[in-house]
Amino acid sequence: MKIKLLALLLFISSASLFAQDYFPINDGVKAKKNNNYTAFTNAKIYVTPTEVINNGTLLIQNGKVVQVGKSVSIPKNAVVEDLNGKSIYPSFIDVFSGFGVKLPKEASGGGRSAQYGPSREGFYWNDHIMPENDAINSFSYDAKEAKELRNAGFGAINAHIEDGIARGTGLLVALNDEASEAQRILSDKSAQYFSFEKSQASRQSYPGSLMGAMALMRQVYYDMDWYSKGNVDTKDRSLEALIANKGLTQIYAAGDNGNVLRADKIGDLFGIQYTILAGGDEYERIDDIKATNAKLILPLNFPDAFDVSNPYEAKYIALKDMRHWNLAPSNPKVLADNGVEFSITLHGLKSPKELKEKIMKAITYGLSETKALEALTTVPAQILGKSGEIGTLKAGSQANFLITSGAIFDKGTTLYENWVQGTKNVIESMDVIDIRGDYDLAVNGTTYKVSLTGDASKPKAEIKKGDETLEAKIDYSSDWLNISFSEDNVGSYRMVAHIIPDTQTIKGNVVLPNGDETSATMTQTSSFDEKSENDDDAEKPELIALTYPNVGYGYKEKPQQEDFLFKNATVWTGESILENTDVLIKKGKIAKVGKDLRAGGATVVDATGKHLTAGIIDEHTHIAALAINEGGHNSSAEVHMEDVVDPKDMDIYRNLAGGVTTAQLLHGSANPIGGQSAILRFKWGENAEGLIFENSPKFIKFALGENVKQSNWGSYSRFPQTRMGVEQVYTDYFQRAKEYDEKKKSGEPYRYDEEMETLVEILNGERFISCHSYVQSEINMMMKVAEKFDFRVNTFTHILEGYKVADKMAEHGVGGGTFSDWWAYKYEVNDAIPYNAAIMTSQGVTVAINSDDAEMSRRLNQEAAKTVKYGGMSEIEAWKTVTLNPAKLLHLDDRVGSIEEGKDADVVLWSDHPLSVYAKAEKTLVEGTVYFDLEKDKMMRESVKKERNKLIGMMLNEKKKGGKTRTPVQNKKERFECDTL
C-alpha cells in the first residue's frame, strides 16, 4: 500500500512539475503544484565519491535534493522510505554518446568520379566541417534505450551527432521518461565536438587521410580567426557557429594514444584545451598523455582473449595485440596513478549491460572504486560544467540517484532503483529476497551442491553431485523456488521450496524419480557477496612488462647514449677507407679518428676484421607512417608527414638491422604537389616526436607522370588529367603563392593559408622539393618552372630517365635519388637502365640510391653495390650513394653521412665488407646510442618466443574458465610506395 501511495504522489507531482506556469489550460482544471517531500532514511549515502554518510537521510522535493546528512529534519508532508542496509549513489553520466540522435544518411553515388567541391552553399567550403549542426535538432528521445541506460546506472547522457570532423554541439538529457522534453533537456548546447573522421553524408574527397584531417582543422581555426575580425563580406554559417560555440567544452574524438596527442597538438597551437576521447591504450605512453593536461573520456572496451586453440592461427596474432589484451584492463589504474583525470563512457561497448563487468575488471586490475565512481559522476559533471546540477547528491542538485543493496561495483550487489529528476525507476524490486549463493541441498540422504548466480530476481542454478554437473532448471517468484534437475541413470527431481526470511535456509518438498515425495532443506554455505570476494582474490592478473615501443622487439628500457672506442676497424670515412683504425665516440659525437686511441672510460669494442661506416641514409621512404597520400586535392602542401609518424612500425627496427639510421619520410605521389616531408632518425623506442631529426631542413614532395594525372586509378573530374595539365598546376600555384607573399610582405591584412605558406617557403629557398619523376620531358618541364619562379628543384627522385638529362640536371643544380636496377614495371619506366646512377654521377650530379620500398630499405648496402657492377663506380663512390650523397641532398652532410670528427655518431659496425651480401650490421648507433645489436637481437628472439607462449597459455586458461574469446585474424600490413597507390 505504501509503495502504491508513493507512486501516486510522484505521478501527481511530476504531472504538475513539468507543466509551465504560463501555459493555458484547455483540458481541465489547473492542478495545484505538489510540493511533497520524499525522505530516504538509514542509508549509506555517497554524496560524492569521497563524501560518504552512514545511516544518513536524503530528502528530495520537486526533482531536487533538498538536504542530505545524518540529522535531517523531515517535514510532515514527506513520504518516508527506510533503506536500512542499503546504499545511495549519484546516478552516472556519459559525456560521449549518440543517444537519441539521428545520424545523417550515407551519401549515395560513387563510381570513378570523386567529389572535390562542397555540396552546400553558405557554409564552410568543406562538407566535413559542420559546427552549425546542433544535436538537439536531430534528437528524439528513445524510451527503450533510456531504460537500458538507466538499468546500467545512468541518469544523464550527453549526446551528439557522431559524424564528421567538426560535428557541432551536443545536448545533455536526463533519462526521465515522465518529463516533458523541456524538462529533460538540461542543456541544448552542452559541448562542441570534433573528430578525425569524415562525414558519411558527403562524398567530398578531401581530406582523405589523418594528416589531411589535421591540416583541415588547423585551417578552419585560421579561417575562423580571419572571419571573426570582419574580413569576409559573405556570411559563413559554419564559421559563425564555431565562433559562437568556442566558449563551450570542446571534445575531440581521438580513439588511440597517438591520436590523443595529435588532437592535443592542434589544441596547443590555438590555445584550446580539448577534452579527448581516448582509446584505452594510453598506458603505453602515459608520460606523454599526462603532459597534455587533458581530461580524457575513457572507453572500457577491453578486448577479449584470442582463441589460440588452433596453433596455426595463433602464429599470425601480432604480439602487440596479445599484449594489449593483457594490459588494456590496467589502463584506468595507470591513468589514475598518474593523475590523469578521466570520465568513463559506454562508447565502444556493445551494450550498457557490459559496463559493470568492465568496471569490475578494471578494479581487479587495480583501479580504486572511488576513482571508478568519480569517472562516472563528478568528473563528467565537471567536464560539462554541470557540477552544481548533476554528479553529486549535494543540496540543490538534481535528484538523480541509485539505490543498491551494497557497494555498487561488487559482483553481488543489486541495483534496485534509479531515480532521475525525482522520478522513480525500478530496476529490481527491493521486496525480492536475494537467495544467490552456494548451498548444500540434502535430499533423501544425498547432499548436492547448489550454486545460485545471475540476477537476484532471476537467479541461475548449477547443481553438482561430486564432480558431476547435473542438468538443472530454476524458477523463482514471490519467495517461492522451483528447481528441477536430472541425474543420469536415476531420473528427475522436482523441488518446490519456500524462502524463510532472515535465515540462510530454504525448505520445501522434493518429488523423487520414483514419484515419492520427501522434505528437503537447502542450507547456505556462502553468500553471493562472499563468493565474489573470494573469486577476486583468486584472480589477481599477471601483467606483461611494457617495452619501448610496446611491440615485439621493443626494449625493456629506452637505450641510453654511451661512449665507445672502436678498435682496429676498417673505417669508411666517406672519402677514403682506413685500415686498422680507431674511432672514439663521446657524448653522441665522433670525437677522434686515428690509430692507438685511448678509451678514457669509453666502452671498447674490438672491431678487428670488421668495417665501420656512417649510418645509411634513405632519401626516399614510406615506412613508419600512418598515412602516405592526401589525394583529395591536386595540391596538399598543407599536410605534414610529421603528423602521422608511427613509432611502433617494425620496419624501423628492420632498417636499423640493415644499418639505416636516417630516412626522409615522403608523402606519396597522388597529386602534383604533395605534403611536407618528415626526416627521421631511427631511434627505436622513442615516441613520434623523438624520431624526428631535430632542426632538420624543410622538404616537400612533388610528383610528375602517370600517378598525378591519374592514369590508372583516379577520377575524370579532377584536374590535371594530362602531363600538360601538371605543368599548369605548378605555374598556377606558384603564381598564387607569389601574389600571397607579396601581400603578406606589404603589411596588409591577409588570410593565413597553410598551403600558400608552404609554397612561399619554396619560393624563398626555405623549403626544398623532392620530386617524383620518370620521363625526361617532364624533368625538363619541372626545372623550367622552377627557374621561371627563381628557385631550384632539390632532388628528382626515381628519375629513371635521368641519364638522358644528366647534363641539364647538373646545370640546374638538382640531385638524383634513384633505384639501382628497377625497370619496366610500368609504361613510363620502359626506358630505364641500370647504368642510370653511374651516368648521372659522371655528369656531376649528386646521386643517391633510395628504396621507396619497406623491404628494399633494409638492404640499401646491397643496392649501392650494384652501381659497381652497372657503371663501374668505385667502392667509395658506390658507398656515398647511400651515406654522404643522401646527406647532401637532405642538407644534413654537416652532421651525418660520413665519419668525421665533430659529426654525429651515427655509425654502423659491419661483420664484413659493407657492399657484400654477406655483411651483417652488428651494431647500429644513432648519436652514440646503440639502437640495434646483433647479439641482443638473438636474445630478444628467444624472449619474444617465451612471451608469446606465456600469453597463449593465459588465453587458453581464459577460454577454459569460460571467458569470451575472439577468432584470430591474420595481421596484414599494407605497403605504401609511390607506385602502389
Image (cartoon, grey):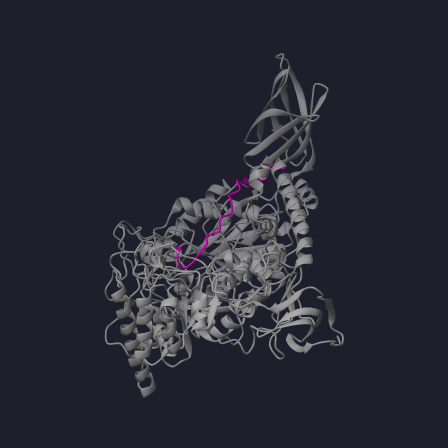
Q: Left or right: 230 with respect to 693? A: left
Q: Nearer the viewer, residue 735 or 403?
A: 735
Quadrant position of residue 818: bottom left
Can residue 167 be seen at all in this image of the molecule? no
Q: Is residue 976 magenta?
A: yes
Please, which residue is most extreme toward the bottom here?
746
Q: Residue at x 39, y 57 (%)?
A: 979
* Residue 681, quarter of the rendered image: bottom right
Q: Residue at x 65, y 54 (%)?
A: 366
Residue 374's place in the image compared with 234, above or below, is: above
Quadrant of the rendering where the C terminus is positioned:
bottom left
Q: Position of residue 167 (x, y in %)?
A: 37, 61
Res 415 quadrant in image: top right
Find residue 839 and report its horizontal and vertical position in percent.
43, 68
Q: Relative to 607, say whether 823 is above or below.
A: above
Q: Which residues are magenta?
A: 961-981
| Front residue of 610 and 459 | 610
Could you say which is closer to the camera, residue 89 or residue 834?
Answer: 834
Residue 58 seen in this snapshot: yes
Q: Is residue 809 magenta?
A: no
Q: Nearer the viewer, residue 392 or 701?
A: 701
Judged left or right of residue 110, residue 583 is: right
- Magenta span main SS: loop
Residue 751, position as x, y percentages in the image:
32, 78
Asked whether, in this view, residue 121 is left or right of residue 598, the answer is: left
Task: Give the number of marks.
Answer: 0
Residue 842: image location, x then y, percent? 45, 72
The residue at the point 56 percent across, 53 percent down is: 89
